[in-house]
């Protein structure tokens, strides 16, 4: 008989992972092509306490992917240290948070990952062992560097057929010129990326292997259900967003898919916090409403699955499952 947790939620079985990409205000402005990002405006002092409070209330441990540039700025130290003190895993989310990471030279990729790792380790006291590329950017050389540096896993793939649609929307809401759009031409992935596996697998990298844990999309349909997307759907109908999530979780169980669920800082920030980020879907809602929505989504996931950080899951899945081998192709 499964013991009921002290928070009153009893999972029905199976595992899920939860991660937070700690993209900061400046990184959203930079990706969107807006001015002022290079002053590195930050909302970490607002967003981090909100997430830590929610995770504590729901008794969740997650993986937080930190941007190296934020870790290198002293004023962010308290927020990042608070994440580590709370017992959450720390991941590497690149140094400069540029979704055109795949366009870097081999030397630039090595420097980008190493600089981020060193800054994050200094700021949090924890060396990251997992990586997620900004905007799901990935290349063969990124995988080579990660494998050589002893990373346990990569989590940069989002196998969704809606990636190009999301990119088109992003371009429509920005004032980027052709050159800037060209750099972002595979932001959120290509149609081909949407056909990659949604279950964990191993990249074959120069004689070794590296575990890939994709951000899960709906089995069969390959459309997203990360929390930002659920918030977007809730703007039209909260009932539909909840049904969408419940149906997705049932499909995951039916297909044996162990979902990897993604959060972003803006999931708990609203228009009453930051009015200059209105281009991000869901930023027309107030923060209090988002808090209720996100808590409800996470409680629903927790009913069905035991939630754990990616690194903990990575150790289990490599030990217990025979995983397919894949060669990277752009």
Image (cartoon, rainbow, N blue to C red):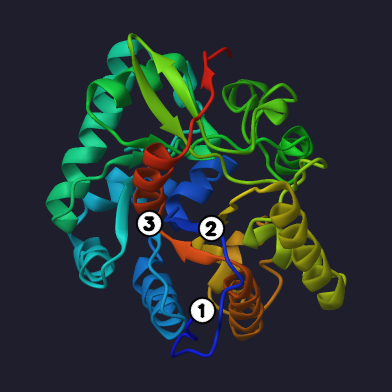
Residue in the picture at 22% in, 30% down: 114
Q: State which mark lies toward you, 2 or 3.
A: 2
Residue carrying label 1: 2
Q: Earlier in the sequence, mark 1 or mark 2?
A: 1
Q: Dot 2 lies on which element?
A: strand
In whole angstroms, how far apart are the C-alphas of marks 2 and 3? 15 Å
Q: State which mark lies toward you, 3 or 1.
A: 1
Q: Dot 1 lies on which element?
A: loop
Q: Earlier in the sequence, mark 3 or mark 1?
A: 1
Q: Looking at the picture, how far across and down is residue 45, in whole percent?
A: 34, 72
Residue carrying label 2: 16
- The correct choice, above or below, for 178 with respect to 62 in the image is above
Q: Earlier in the sequence, mark 2 or mark 3?
A: 2
Residue 143 visible to an observer of this rendering: yes
Q: Dot 3 lies on which element?
A: strand
CA neighbours of label 3 inside 10 A, class few (<14), some (14 to 19), many (20+): many
Q: Nearer the viewer, residue 80 or 253?
A: 253
In whole angstroms, how far apart are the C-alphas of marks 3 and 1? 29 Å
In whole angstroms, how far apart are the C-alphas of marks 1 and 2? 17 Å
Query: Taking 179 as reference, is 100 left or right?
Result: left
Residue carrying label 3: 64
Answer yes or no: do the residues labelled 2 and 3 have beta carbons within 8 Å?
no
Residue in the picture at 27% in, 41% down: 129
């Amino acid at each position: 008989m499964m013991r009921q947790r002290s928070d009153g939620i009893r999972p029905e079985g199976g595992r899920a992972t939860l991660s937070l990409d700690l993209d900061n205000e400046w990184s959203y402005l930079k990706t969107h092509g807006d001015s002022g990002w290079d002053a590195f405006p930050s909302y970490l002092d607002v967003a981090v306490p909100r997430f830590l409070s929610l995770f504590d209330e729901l008794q969740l441990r997650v993986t937080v992917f930190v941007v190296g540039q934020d870790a290198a700025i002293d004023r962010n130290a308290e927020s990042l240290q608070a994440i580590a003190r709370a017992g959450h895993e720390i991941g590497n989310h690149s140094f400069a948070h540029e979704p055109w990471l795949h366009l870097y030279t081999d030397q630039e990729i090595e420097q980008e990952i190493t600089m981020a790792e060193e800054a994050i380790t200094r700021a949090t006291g924890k060396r990251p062992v997992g990586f997620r590329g900004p905007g799901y950017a990935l290349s063969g050389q990124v995988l080579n560097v990660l494998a050589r540096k002893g990373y346990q896993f990569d989590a940069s793939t989002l196998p969704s057929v809606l990636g190009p649609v999301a990119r088109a929307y992003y371009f429509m809401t920005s004032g980027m010129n052709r050159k800037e759009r060209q750099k972002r031409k595979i932001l959120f992935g290509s149609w081909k990326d949407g056909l990659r596996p949604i279950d964990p697998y191993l990249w074959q990298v120069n004689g070794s292997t590296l575990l890939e844990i994709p951000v899960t999309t709906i089995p069969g349909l390959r459309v997203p259900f990360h929390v930002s997307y659920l918030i977007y759907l809730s703007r039209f109908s909260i009932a539909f967003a909840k049904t969408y999530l419940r149906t997705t979780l049932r499909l995951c169980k039916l297909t044996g898919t162990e979902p990897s669920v993604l959060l972003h800082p803006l999931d708990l920030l609203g228009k009453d916090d930051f009015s200059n980020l209105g281009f991000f879907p869901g930023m027309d809602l107030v923060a209090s409403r988002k808090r209720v929505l996100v808590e409800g989504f996470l409680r629903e996931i927790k009913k069905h699955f035991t939630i754990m950080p990616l690194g903990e899951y990575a150790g289990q899945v490599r030990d217990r499952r025979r995983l397919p081998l894949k060669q990277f192709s752009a």
